[in-house]
Amino acid sequence: MHRLHWATAPLRSLNILVVYFVLVGMWLLLDTGGDDWFTLQPARVLLFMLVTFPVALVAGAVGVWVWWSVRFWIDGDDLVVDTGAVRSRIRRIPLSRMQGVDVVSPLLGRLLGLAEVRLELAGGNSAEITLRYLSGRRAQVLRAELVALAAGLPGHTPEAPERPFCRVGFGALFVSLVLRIPVLLSFVLFVALIVFGIVTKELAVLGVAIPIMLGLSREVIAPLVMYTRFRSSISPDGIRLRFGLLESRLQTVPPGRIQALRVVEPWMWRHFGWARVEMTVAGYGGERQALSSTLLPVGPREAAFALVSEVFPGISLEGVALTPAKSRWRGRDAAGVTREAFVSRRGRFCRTWDVVDFARAQSVRLTSSPLQRLFGLGTVQVDVPPGPVQVAAVDWEAARARELADETVTRARSARVRSGSLERWAG
Protein backbone atom coordinates (compact mmCIF):
# COMPACT_ATOMS: atom_id res chain seq x y z
CA MET A 1 0.00 0.00 0.00
CA HIS A 2 1.31 3.44 -0.94
CA ARG A 3 0.45 7.00 -0.05
CA LEU A 4 0.94 10.24 -1.89
CA HIS A 5 4.04 12.33 -1.27
CA TRP A 6 3.92 14.14 2.06
CA ALA A 7 4.24 17.49 0.26
CA THR A 8 0.67 16.95 -0.99
CA ALA A 9 -0.64 18.19 2.38
CA PRO A 10 1.07 21.62 2.41
CA LEU A 11 0.41 22.14 -1.29
CA ARG A 12 -3.30 21.48 -0.81
CA SER A 13 -3.30 23.84 2.14
CA LEU A 14 -1.48 26.47 0.10
CA ASN A 15 -4.15 26.28 -2.62
CA ILE A 16 -6.85 26.98 -0.05
CA LEU A 17 -4.91 29.90 1.43
CA VAL A 18 -4.32 31.47 -1.99
CA VAL A 19 -8.05 31.34 -2.75
CA TYR A 20 -8.82 32.79 0.68
CA PHE A 21 -6.34 35.63 0.21
CA VAL A 22 -7.68 36.59 -3.22
CA LEU A 23 -11.34 36.45 -2.21
CA VAL A 24 -11.18 37.69 1.40
CA GLY A 25 -7.75 38.34 2.89
CA MET A 26 -6.59 40.97 0.42
CA TRP A 27 -9.71 43.04 1.04
CA LEU A 28 -9.19 42.86 4.79
CA LEU A 29 -5.79 44.51 4.35
CA LEU A 30 -6.79 47.15 1.81
CA ASP A 31 -8.43 50.38 2.89
CA THR A 32 -10.97 50.67 0.10
CA GLY A 33 -12.46 53.82 1.56
CA GLY A 34 -9.24 55.86 1.65
CA ASP A 35 -7.18 57.58 -1.01
CA ASP A 36 -4.18 55.28 -0.61
CA TRP A 37 -5.08 51.58 -0.72
CA PHE A 38 -1.55 50.46 0.05
CA THR A 39 -1.32 52.00 3.51
CA LEU A 40 -1.39 49.16 6.03
CA GLN A 41 -3.28 50.30 9.10
CA PRO A 42 -2.52 48.42 12.36
CA ALA A 43 -6.20 47.73 12.95
CA ARG A 44 -6.59 46.10 9.52
CA VAL A 45 -3.41 44.06 9.95
CA LEU A 46 -4.70 42.80 13.29
CA LEU A 47 -8.08 41.91 11.76
CA PHE A 48 -6.31 40.12 8.92
CA MET A 49 -4.24 38.06 11.36
CA LEU A 50 -7.24 37.20 13.53
CA VAL A 51 -9.18 35.93 10.50
CA THR A 52 -6.23 34.27 8.74
CA PHE A 53 -5.04 32.23 11.72
CA PRO A 54 -8.16 30.00 11.99
CA VAL A 55 -8.37 29.78 8.20
CA ALA A 56 -4.76 28.57 8.10
CA LEU A 57 -5.55 25.94 10.74
CA VAL A 58 -8.52 24.69 8.73
CA ALA A 59 -6.48 24.70 5.50
CA GLY A 60 -3.71 22.71 7.20
CA ALA A 61 -6.21 20.19 8.54
CA VAL A 62 -7.82 19.80 5.12
CA GLY A 63 -4.42 19.28 3.46
CA VAL A 64 -3.43 16.57 5.95
CA TRP A 65 -6.87 14.97 5.65
CA VAL A 66 -6.64 14.78 1.85
CA TRP A 67 -3.13 13.33 1.98
CA TRP A 68 -3.99 10.75 4.65
CA SER A 69 -7.23 9.63 3.02
CA VAL A 70 -5.72 8.54 -0.31
CA ARG A 71 -4.03 5.15 -0.58
CA PHE A 72 -3.28 3.06 -3.64
CA TRP A 73 -1.73 -0.29 -4.50
CA ILE A 74 -1.52 -2.80 -7.33
CA ASP A 75 -3.45 -6.04 -6.90
CA GLY A 76 -2.70 -8.47 -9.71
CA ASP A 77 -3.60 -6.67 -12.94
CA ASP A 78 -5.68 -4.02 -11.17
CA LEU A 79 -4.85 -0.65 -9.68
CA VAL A 80 -6.78 -0.13 -6.46
CA VAL A 81 -7.36 3.39 -5.14
CA ASP A 82 -8.83 3.80 -1.65
CA THR A 83 -10.09 7.27 -0.73
CA GLY A 84 -11.63 8.39 2.54
CA ALA A 85 -10.35 8.29 6.09
CA VAL A 86 -13.72 7.72 7.77
CA ARG A 87 -15.81 6.27 4.98
CA SER A 88 -13.63 4.24 2.65
CA ARG A 89 -14.35 4.34 -1.09
CA ILE A 90 -12.40 1.72 -3.02
CA ARG A 91 -12.08 1.93 -6.79
CA ARG A 92 -10.57 -1.00 -8.70
CA ILE A 93 -9.26 -0.24 -12.20
CA PRO A 94 -8.48 -3.14 -14.57
CA LEU A 95 -5.24 -2.04 -16.19
CA SER A 96 -5.98 -3.97 -19.38
CA ARG A 97 -8.73 -1.42 -20.05
CA MET A 98 -6.60 1.62 -19.32
CA GLN A 99 -6.76 4.13 -22.18
CA GLY A 100 -3.78 6.32 -21.33
CA VAL A 101 -1.35 7.23 -18.59
CA ASP A 102 0.29 10.64 -18.30
CA VAL A 103 2.92 12.09 -15.98
CA VAL A 104 2.18 15.80 -15.48
CA SER A 105 4.45 18.24 -13.66
CA PRO A 106 2.86 21.64 -12.95
CA LEU A 107 5.21 24.59 -12.55
CA LEU A 108 5.22 24.51 -8.75
CA GLY A 109 5.51 20.73 -8.76
CA ARG A 110 8.54 20.87 -11.05
CA LEU A 111 10.25 23.29 -8.69
CA LEU A 112 9.69 20.84 -5.82
CA GLY A 113 10.46 17.70 -7.82
CA LEU A 114 6.84 16.46 -7.75
CA ALA A 115 4.52 15.14 -10.44
CA GLU A 116 1.00 13.84 -11.00
CA VAL A 117 0.07 10.50 -12.52
CA ARG A 118 -3.16 10.64 -14.53
CA LEU A 119 -4.90 7.52 -15.77
CA GLU A 120 -7.44 7.85 -18.57
CA LEU A 121 -10.23 5.30 -18.51
CA ALA A 122 -13.15 4.53 -20.77
CA GLY A 123 -16.50 5.73 -19.60
CA GLY A 124 -17.03 9.46 -20.07
CA ASN A 125 -15.74 12.75 -18.76
CA SER A 126 -15.33 11.59 -15.15
CA ALA A 127 -13.38 8.44 -15.99
CA GLU A 128 -10.03 9.74 -14.83
CA ILE A 129 -7.81 8.83 -11.89
CA THR A 130 -5.32 11.44 -10.67
CA LEU A 131 -2.63 10.65 -8.11
CA ARG A 132 -1.46 14.09 -6.96
CA TYR A 133 1.39 14.34 -5.91
CA LEU A 134 4.23 11.81 -6.13
CA SER A 135 7.95 12.35 -6.30
CA GLY A 136 9.17 12.69 -9.89
CA ARG A 137 11.08 9.41 -9.71
CA ARG A 138 8.19 7.54 -8.09
CA ALA A 139 5.80 8.85 -10.74
CA GLN A 140 8.03 7.56 -13.56
CA VAL A 141 8.40 4.15 -11.91
CA LEU A 142 4.64 3.88 -11.33
CA ARG A 143 3.91 4.85 -14.94
CA ALA A 144 6.30 2.17 -16.24
CA GLU A 145 4.76 -0.43 -13.93
CA LEU A 146 1.21 0.41 -14.99
CA VAL A 147 2.11 0.31 -18.68
CA ALA A 148 3.84 -3.06 -18.28
CA LEU A 149 0.89 -4.59 -16.45
CA ALA A 150 -1.56 -3.12 -18.97
CA ALA A 151 0.42 -4.84 -21.75
CA GLY A 152 0.28 -8.18 -19.93
CA LEU A 153 3.92 -8.07 -18.75
CA PRO A 154 5.26 -8.40 -15.20
CA GLY A 155 5.13 -5.15 -13.25
CA HIS A 156 8.89 -5.16 -12.64
CA THR A 157 9.59 -5.14 -16.39
CA PRO A 158 12.09 -2.33 -17.15
CA GLU A 159 10.80 0.65 -19.05
CA ALA A 160 10.91 0.01 -22.77
CA PRO A 161 13.57 1.91 -24.74
CA GLU A 162 12.45 4.64 -27.08
CA ARG A 163 13.49 5.95 -30.47
CA PRO A 164 13.32 9.73 -31.01
CA PHE A 165 10.91 10.52 -33.81
CA CYS A 166 10.22 14.25 -34.13
CA ARG A 167 11.00 17.52 -32.35
CA VAL A 168 9.06 20.77 -32.88
CA GLY A 169 11.05 23.99 -32.57
CA PHE A 170 9.62 27.09 -30.93
CA GLY A 171 9.90 29.16 -34.12
CA ALA A 172 8.07 26.63 -36.29
CA LEU A 173 5.35 26.24 -33.66
CA PHE A 174 4.81 29.99 -33.36
CA VAL A 175 4.74 30.60 -37.12
CA SER A 176 2.35 27.69 -37.66
CA LEU A 177 -0.08 29.08 -35.08
CA VAL A 178 0.02 32.53 -36.66
CA LEU A 179 -0.19 31.37 -40.30
CA ARG A 180 -3.85 30.48 -40.16
CA ILE A 181 -6.45 32.48 -42.04
CA PRO A 182 -8.84 32.97 -39.05
CA VAL A 183 -5.93 34.13 -36.85
CA LEU A 184 -4.61 36.58 -39.46
CA LEU A 185 -8.06 38.00 -40.16
CA SER A 186 -8.71 38.41 -36.44
CA PHE A 187 -5.37 40.17 -35.97
CA VAL A 188 -6.06 42.57 -38.87
CA LEU A 189 -9.50 43.35 -37.44
CA PHE A 190 -8.01 43.93 -33.98
CA VAL A 191 -5.39 46.35 -35.31
CA ALA A 192 -8.00 48.17 -37.39
CA LEU A 193 -10.24 48.61 -34.36
CA ILE A 194 -7.39 49.93 -32.21
CA VAL A 195 -6.32 52.40 -34.91
CA PHE A 196 -9.92 53.52 -35.39
CA GLY A 197 -10.33 54.00 -31.64
CA ILE A 198 -7.15 56.06 -31.39
CA VAL A 199 -8.04 58.27 -34.36
CA THR A 200 -11.64 58.87 -33.30
CA LYS A 201 -10.90 58.76 -29.55
CA GLU A 202 -13.78 56.34 -29.21
CA LEU A 203 -13.30 53.89 -26.34
CA ALA A 204 -16.37 51.88 -27.29
CA VAL A 205 -14.27 49.91 -29.79
CA LEU A 206 -12.68 48.15 -26.82
CA GLY A 207 -15.94 46.26 -26.38
CA VAL A 208 -15.13 44.46 -29.63
CA ALA A 209 -11.34 44.60 -29.55
CA ILE A 210 -10.94 42.93 -26.14
CA PRO A 211 -12.95 39.78 -27.06
CA ILE A 212 -10.89 39.52 -30.27
CA MET A 213 -7.68 39.81 -28.24
CA LEU A 214 -8.88 37.07 -25.87
CA GLY A 215 -9.70 34.88 -28.86
CA LEU A 216 -6.22 35.42 -30.30
CA SER A 217 -4.71 34.50 -26.94
CA ARG A 218 -6.69 31.28 -26.90
CA GLU A 219 -5.75 30.39 -30.48
CA VAL A 220 -2.07 31.38 -30.32
CA ILE A 221 -0.73 31.93 -26.80
CA ALA A 222 -2.44 28.95 -25.12
CA PRO A 223 -1.27 26.34 -27.70
CA LEU A 224 2.17 27.96 -27.77
CA VAL A 225 2.55 27.53 -24.01
CA MET A 226 1.07 24.04 -24.10
CA TYR A 227 3.15 22.55 -26.96
CA THR A 228 6.48 24.33 -26.47
CA ARG A 229 9.38 21.82 -26.25
CA PHE A 230 7.31 19.19 -28.06
CA ARG A 231 9.11 15.91 -28.63
CA SER A 232 7.77 12.55 -29.76
CA SER A 233 9.39 9.13 -29.46
CA ILE A 234 8.44 5.64 -30.54
CA SER A 235 8.61 2.78 -28.03
CA PRO A 236 7.13 -0.72 -27.79
CA ASP A 237 4.56 0.49 -25.24
CA GLY A 238 3.31 3.31 -27.46
CA ILE A 239 4.09 6.78 -28.71
CA ARG A 240 5.57 9.01 -26.02
CA LEU A 241 4.86 12.72 -26.23
CA ARG A 242 6.67 15.30 -24.10
CA PHE A 243 5.58 18.92 -24.17
CA GLY A 244 4.68 21.94 -22.10
CA LEU A 245 6.29 25.19 -20.98
CA LEU A 246 4.63 25.87 -17.62
CA GLU A 247 3.13 22.40 -17.16
CA SER A 248 5.41 19.61 -18.35
CA ARG A 249 3.57 16.52 -19.59
CA LEU A 250 4.69 13.03 -20.56
CA GLN A 251 1.84 11.41 -22.46
CA THR A 252 1.98 7.78 -23.53
CA VAL A 253 -0.38 6.99 -26.40
CA PRO A 254 -0.83 3.28 -27.10
CA PRO A 255 -1.41 2.63 -30.82
CA GLY A 256 -4.01 0.02 -29.91
CA ARG A 257 -6.21 2.75 -28.40
CA ILE A 258 -6.02 5.15 -31.36
CA GLN A 259 -9.21 4.73 -33.36
CA ALA A 260 -8.62 7.16 -36.22
CA LEU A 261 -6.07 9.71 -37.46
CA ARG A 262 -6.31 12.96 -39.36
CA VAL A 263 -3.47 14.70 -41.21
CA VAL A 264 -4.26 18.39 -41.70
CA GLU A 265 -2.49 20.52 -44.33
CA PRO A 266 -3.71 24.15 -44.13
CA TRP A 267 -3.24 26.15 -47.32
CA MET A 268 -0.70 28.54 -45.80
CA TRP A 269 1.31 25.64 -44.33
CA ARG A 270 1.77 23.83 -47.63
CA HIS A 271 4.38 26.39 -48.75
CA PHE A 272 6.59 25.15 -45.88
CA GLY A 273 5.62 21.48 -46.34
CA TRP A 274 4.02 21.35 -42.87
CA ALA A 275 1.16 19.24 -41.54
CA ARG A 276 -0.60 18.51 -38.25
CA VAL A 277 -1.71 15.10 -36.97
CA GLU A 278 -4.84 14.70 -34.82
CA MET A 279 -6.24 11.53 -33.31
CA THR A 280 -9.35 10.05 -31.80
CA VAL A 281 -8.50 7.95 -28.76
CA ALA A 282 -10.87 5.37 -27.31
CA GLY A 283 -12.28 6.33 -23.94
CA TYR A 284 -11.44 10.02 -24.09
CA GLY A 285 -14.37 12.40 -24.04
CA GLY A 286 -15.22 16.06 -23.67
CA GLU A 287 -12.36 18.21 -22.41
CA ARG A 288 -10.02 15.22 -22.08
CA GLN A 289 -10.45 14.45 -25.79
CA ALA A 290 -9.68 18.07 -26.71
CA LEU A 291 -6.52 18.11 -24.57
CA SER A 292 -5.31 14.72 -25.78
CA SER A 293 -6.16 14.78 -29.49
CA THR A 294 -2.91 16.20 -30.91
CA LEU A 295 -0.30 13.69 -31.98
CA LEU A 296 1.87 16.25 -33.79
CA PRO A 297 1.11 20.01 -33.55
CA VAL A 298 3.20 20.82 -36.63
CA GLY A 299 5.93 19.05 -38.53
CA PRO A 300 7.19 18.07 -41.97
CA ARG A 301 4.58 16.43 -44.17
CA GLU A 302 6.79 13.37 -44.49
CA ALA A 303 6.96 13.03 -40.70
CA ALA A 304 3.17 13.28 -40.44
CA PHE A 305 2.67 10.53 -43.03
CA ALA A 306 5.34 8.40 -41.34
CA LEU A 307 3.50 8.81 -38.04
CA VAL A 308 0.37 7.37 -39.63
CA SER A 309 2.40 4.35 -40.72
CA GLU A 310 3.74 3.95 -37.16
CA VAL A 311 0.24 3.93 -35.67
CA PHE A 312 -1.35 1.83 -38.43
CA PRO A 313 1.43 -0.44 -39.78
CA GLY A 314 1.23 -1.21 -43.45
CA ILE A 315 -0.67 1.96 -44.35
CA SER A 316 1.02 4.50 -46.62
CA LEU A 317 -1.20 7.48 -47.38
CA GLU A 318 0.62 8.39 -50.57
CA GLY A 319 0.35 4.80 -51.79
CA VAL A 320 -3.43 4.50 -51.38
CA ALA A 321 -5.40 4.51 -54.64
CA LEU A 322 -8.09 7.13 -54.12
CA THR A 323 -11.24 7.51 -56.21
CA PRO A 324 -12.45 11.11 -56.68
CA ALA A 325 -15.91 12.15 -55.57
CA LYS A 326 -18.43 12.68 -58.36
CA SER A 327 -19.40 16.24 -57.35
CA ARG A 328 -17.44 18.89 -59.25
CA TRP A 329 -17.56 21.31 -56.32
CA ARG A 330 -15.79 18.72 -54.19
CA GLY A 331 -12.53 19.45 -56.04
CA ARG A 332 -9.80 17.08 -54.83
CA ASP A 333 -12.08 15.12 -52.48
CA ALA A 334 -11.51 11.39 -52.83
CA ALA A 335 -11.63 8.16 -50.87
CA GLY A 336 -10.27 4.65 -51.08
CA VAL A 337 -9.68 1.44 -49.18
CA THR A 338 -6.72 -0.82 -48.61
CA ARG A 339 -6.56 -4.21 -46.97
CA GLU A 340 -6.09 -2.51 -43.58
CA ALA A 341 -7.78 0.89 -43.68
CA PHE A 342 -10.36 3.31 -45.03
CA VAL A 343 -8.83 6.60 -46.24
CA SER A 344 -10.54 9.81 -47.31
CA ARG A 345 -9.11 13.13 -48.52
CA ARG A 346 -11.13 16.33 -48.34
CA GLY A 347 -10.73 20.08 -48.68
CA ARG A 348 -9.50 22.41 -51.37
CA PHE A 349 -7.80 25.05 -49.19
CA CYS A 350 -7.34 23.11 -45.95
CA ARG A 351 -6.59 19.57 -47.07
CA THR A 352 -7.30 16.76 -44.62
CA TRP A 353 -6.52 13.06 -44.77
CA ASP A 354 -8.73 10.88 -42.53
CA VAL A 355 -7.68 7.32 -41.78
CA VAL A 356 -9.40 4.58 -39.80
CA ASP A 357 -8.10 1.05 -39.34
CA PHE A 358 -10.80 -1.45 -40.32
CA ALA A 359 -10.20 -3.37 -37.10
CA ARG A 360 -11.34 -0.27 -35.15
CA ALA A 361 -14.38 0.66 -37.22
CA GLN A 362 -17.51 0.47 -35.09
CA SER A 363 -20.12 0.69 -37.84
CA VAL A 364 -20.58 1.72 -41.44
CA ARG A 365 -23.40 4.00 -42.63
CA LEU A 366 -24.64 4.85 -46.10
CA THR A 367 -26.62 8.10 -46.03
CA SER A 368 -28.18 10.31 -48.67
CA SER A 369 -29.77 13.70 -48.04
CA PRO A 370 -32.71 14.93 -50.15
CA LEU A 371 -30.31 17.09 -52.20
CA GLN A 372 -27.93 14.17 -52.70
CA ARG A 373 -30.80 11.91 -53.81
CA LEU A 374 -31.74 14.54 -56.37
CA PHE A 375 -28.31 14.11 -57.99
CA GLY A 376 -27.99 10.38 -57.33
CA LEU A 377 -25.25 10.76 -54.68
CA GLY A 378 -24.53 9.20 -51.30
CA THR A 379 -22.09 9.41 -48.39
CA VAL A 380 -20.28 6.48 -46.76
CA GLN A 381 -19.54 7.16 -43.07
CA VAL A 382 -17.21 4.93 -41.04
CA ASP A 383 -18.12 5.43 -37.39
CA VAL A 384 -15.51 5.65 -34.64
CA PRO A 385 -15.81 6.90 -31.02
CA PRO A 386 -16.51 10.64 -30.59
CA GLY A 387 -13.50 12.80 -31.37
CA PRO A 388 -11.98 15.22 -33.86
CA VAL A 389 -11.65 12.61 -36.61
CA GLN A 390 -14.79 11.54 -38.46
CA VAL A 391 -14.06 9.51 -41.59
CA ALA A 392 -16.41 9.76 -44.58
CA ALA A 393 -16.51 9.54 -48.37
CA VAL A 394 -18.86 12.35 -49.38
CA ASP A 395 -20.90 12.68 -52.59
CA TRP A 396 -20.17 9.41 -54.28
CA GLU A 397 -22.37 8.04 -57.03
CA ALA A 398 -25.13 6.08 -55.25
CA ALA A 399 -24.32 2.69 -56.78
CA ARG A 400 -20.59 3.07 -56.15
CA ALA A 401 -21.30 4.30 -52.61
CA ARG A 402 -23.27 1.12 -51.96
CA GLU A 403 -20.38 -0.99 -53.27
CA LEU A 404 -17.90 0.96 -51.11
CA ALA A 405 -20.06 0.50 -48.01
CA ASP A 406 -20.41 -3.24 -48.60
CA GLU A 407 -16.68 -3.60 -49.21
CA THR A 408 -15.91 -1.63 -46.04
CA VAL A 409 -18.16 -3.88 -43.96
CA THR A 410 -16.51 -7.01 -45.36
CA ARG A 411 -12.97 -5.71 -44.82
CA ALA A 412 -13.80 -4.52 -41.29
CA ARG A 413 -15.14 -7.95 -40.36
CA SER A 414 -12.02 -9.67 -41.72
CA ALA A 415 -9.71 -7.17 -40.00
CA ARG A 416 -11.31 -7.78 -36.59
CA VAL A 417 -10.84 -11.52 -37.02
CA ARG A 418 -7.17 -11.06 -37.94
CA SER A 419 -6.42 -8.62 -35.13
CA GLY A 420 -8.08 -10.66 -32.38
CA SER A 421 -8.76 -8.90 -29.07
CA LEU A 422 -7.83 -5.23 -28.68
CA GLU A 423 -8.23 -5.31 -24.92
CA ARG A 424 -4.54 -5.15 -24.12
CA TRP A 425 -2.67 -1.88 -23.93
CA ALA A 426 -0.85 -2.00 -27.26
CA GLY A 427 -3.18 -4.45 -28.93
Image (cartoon, helix red, strand yellow):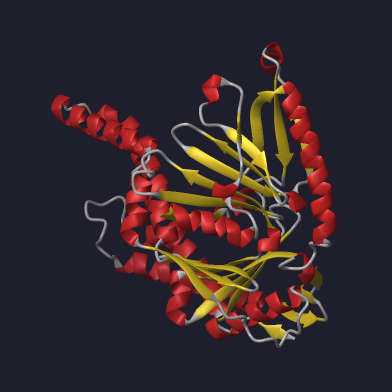
Of the pair 137 and 169, the residue shown nearer to us: 169
Considering every residue shown, the one lying at the far left of the view is 199
Taking the spot 49% from the left edge, 74% from the top edge, the residue there is 53
Which residue is drawn at the image coordinates 61% and 38% (left, top)? 322
Return the residue nearer the eye: 247 or 109: 247
Q: Position of residue 163 (x, y in %)?
A: 52, 75
**Residue at the spot 78% in from the left edge and 65% down from the top edge:** 97
Indicate the position of residue 410 as horizontal and vertical percent values: 83, 43
229 vs 353: above or below: below
Count of residue discs: 0
Please state which of residues 145 and 91 is positioned toward the viewer in this rendering: 145
Say left or right for 329 vs 401. Answer: left
Image-based side of 267 in relation to 65, left or right:
left
**In this orientation, does residue 256 appear?**
yes
List x then y, in percent, for residue 424: 77, 68
The part of the image, by quadrant, that contains residue 86 is bottom right
The answer to whether residue 78 is left or right of residue 331 is right
Residue 104: x, y in percent? 54, 70
Left or right of residue 166: residue 179: left
Say if 30 sits above or below 356 in the image.
below
- On the question of residue 14 being in view, the answer is no
Figure check: 134 above or below 427: below
- Specify the quadrant that holds the C terminus: bottom right
* Image quarter (top left, top right, bottom left or bottom right) of the N terminus: bottom right
